[in-house]
Image (tube, rainbow, N blue to C red):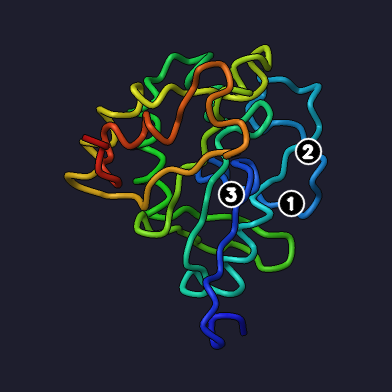
Amino acid sequence: EAKKHGYIVAMAPAQSYLDASAHEASYKLNNNPSVPDWHQDFPYHGRNAYAYLLAEYGTENFDLVTLQLYEGWSRANYEITKKGVAPSEYVRSLVRSMDEGWKVTFPDLGEKKVSVPASKLIIGLANGWAKDSEGKFLFIQPSDLATGTAATRSDLQHRGYGFWNIGDEGTGEVHLARGLNAFMNTRQQPQ
């Protein structure tokens, strides 16, 4: 209905709420991480709960999807910090998986394929505040994304990056806007 009136419709799920690596859906939001050996004492994950919105109402009804990789003990955190996957490679693979789509089994809808086109996908990052979280929240330096983004842009370009939050820009000497712009070139650098 909002789109019919000219509004932009966006969603910003935590990664476990829209997880292209998981095929199970639950409408409860008190799940442990879906990775068996990863912080099972943290019962605050979703299980593709936002995938329901895509399956039921269609991806075409959403203009932007900002996937929060900084969710507490996220899958991205596990893959990057525990398994050692390079952040640029992880993002490239994630963008491709979400664009191609994945099957999710819903309690009431059965199995449905959902996807987020790369052109609508914004990768949500944490800025300097996450550096002091004792590993709970994933922090990625912009320079660690430059290689993967350049490669992604040549074959499958995602919409870009977003971060939480502008009020913490500069915390811990982390300037995500400046760091991301250094390789994305969305704004001209001052002369």
Q: Can you tell which quarter of the image residue 176 is in?
A: top left
- Say whether disc 2 or disc 3 marks the residue closer to the N-terminus: 3
- Say whether disc 2 or disc 1 marks the residue closer to the N-terminus: 1
Mark 1 Cα within 10 Å, few/some/many (few <14, many 20+)?
A: some
Q: Determine which residue is flagged by label 2.
A: 31
Q: Can you tell which quarter of the image residue 130 is in?
A: top right
Q: Name the secondary structure under disc 2.
A: strand
Could you tell whether 5 is left or right of 44 in the image?
Answer: left
Q: Determine which residue is flagged by label 1.
A: 26
What residue is at 68 percent from the left and 46 percent from the top? 47
Q: Determine which residue is flagged by label 3.
A: 18
51 w.r.t. 125: above or below: below
Q: Name the secondary structure under disc 1.
A: strand
Of the residues shown, which amino acid type is indicated by label 1? Ser
What x and y, as percent, mark residue 51?
A: 60, 58
Q: Can you tell which quarter of the image residue 31 is in?
A: top right
What x and y, as percent, mark residue 191?
A: 21, 35
What residue is at 63 percent from the left and 43 percent from the top? 14
Count of picture labels: 3
Could you tell whether 146 is left or right of 126 in the image?
Answer: left
